[in-house]
Image: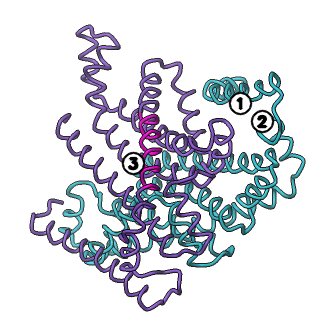
Amino acid sequence: MARSAGQRDGFALLGMLGIAMFLLAWEVIGQNRWLGLTWPALSEVVVFLFTPSRQTLFLRALSASLGSLFVGYCLGLFAGIAAATLAHTVSAMRSGLDTMSAFIHAIPSIALAPLFIVFIGREHTPAALAALSTFFVMYVSTTSSFASSRQEWIDLMRVLGASRLDRLRRLDIPAATPIIVGGMRLAAPSALIGVIIGEWFGATRGVGVLIINAMQNFQIPLLWSAVVLAVIVSLGLFALLGMLQKYAERRFR
Amino acid sequence: MIANIKRFIGSAWIVLAMLAAWEALFSIHAINSIVMVSPSSIAKEVLNHPQEFGAATLRTLLLAVAGLVLGMTIGTLLAVATWLSRFISGLLTPVSIIFASVPVVAIIPILARLFGYETGTVLAIVAIISFFPAFVFTSSGLRSLPPGSDDLFRILGVGKVRRLYHLAFPSAIPQWTIALRLAAANAVLSAIVAEFLMGTGGLGYVFNVARGELAMSHALGASAIAAVISIACFFGATVLERKARSRWS
């Protein structure tokens, strides 16, 4: 179903209208207190977020969370790709690694957090949980991307006498890159979830700490501001990695 | 039978090795049970309190399943409704995609404050979190028709409702099962997180209370049950997805 450019523009316009209506509804519900005191208006949250006296609070929380996110994300990224490459080249490891990653992923992070606090300490738990979620997404997307090499090309390389390593370098990795980058995009929000849950278990600073403290102390504007902050980080990373994915698709296809 | 055992060991050996290493750590070092406990003592703890763990598991499971069914149903129905109208789907799709990529556990505290600390809130939270993948994936599935098929149906003068039934539904089912897999895993997680935060009973609550009392084997017993449920959900949904794929695509 090919759509003309005009139709697509109309669709994008409608989408923006939808987002605008959502934000307007948020504002109106908050202004009129239709859902009680726990639903502040959008403008109240924005004012709260940008009050100069609170900038240090938010910036400190944000830098702590982003630090854990970065460390955990990078660790999970490399470990996931490395494990998938291992499973791809050494077929004896394949099903063991498959089960292990599904198993680790299925354990709720809220159940793992206390274990991590004991084994690696409070301050490293957010990064470790982020690393685990990233690991799973990267493992799954990398293994499925290796399967995307076309059979004719595999046959061709074999006929030309390429070794397994040659094939990995010249065929599998270039063919896999766009799907792996897609996995990197999906991993970002789940890594952030890992950081937030990790911080709930007694980190000293971070966006997750702000959320949980504000919830328990009934600081509604702070609660909403902290959640909005987390959402902005998640959407920002998602958009950034989305651009990287578009680039990878153009470059490798 | 022996082949099955062999296959099980072949696929689970890394997990088994990790558990064995954890257990072995305890026979080598004496570790205080407030700090950490061994897998065997966690299993013993669960088996020694069948009633408490059983009731909590049942409660969490019921809430997760009810919320999942509710959220998936509303999400699917709304996706079908928006399929019928281009205007509404254009309006709603970007908003729901933004919501679907939001870190879900971050909004649980807001929902908890909004609806109050009650059991019904856990249900609402699970339903809301299950709604978004159902809506997004069903919507995109209803639109990913085989090339030309929609034009063919139109030329043959097939009405909208029959196009939906004979063309869009079959093409949406594989995507819908992906939504189910994602939502099922999240349903258990979000039910436990909500119970943990609000203290409304269930596995999350058992876990939180035991953690506060430094009863590590009791707390990790709740964790272990949660893990087993999640793993079962994940594999169940994966099998369902594979079946749906081979049948409808």
Residue B101 percent coordinates (x, y)? 40, 58
Residue situated furthest front in the rendering: A53
Q: Which chain is cyan?
A: B
Q: Label 2: chain? A: B
Amino acid tagged 1: Leu
Residue B107 percent coordinates (x, y)? 51, 66
To which residue does mark 2 refer? B39
- Return the mark for residue A186: 3
Pointers 1 and 2 in contact (CB under 8 A)?
A: yes
Q: Which chain is purple?
A: A
Residue situated furthest bottom in the rendering: A32
**What is the quadrant of residue B169 in the picture?**
bottom left
- Return the mark for residue B19: 1
Compared with residue B247, is residue A173 higher up or lower down, i.e. above or below?
Answer: above
Residue situated furthest top in the rendering: A161
Which stretch did the figure color magenta? Answer: A60-77
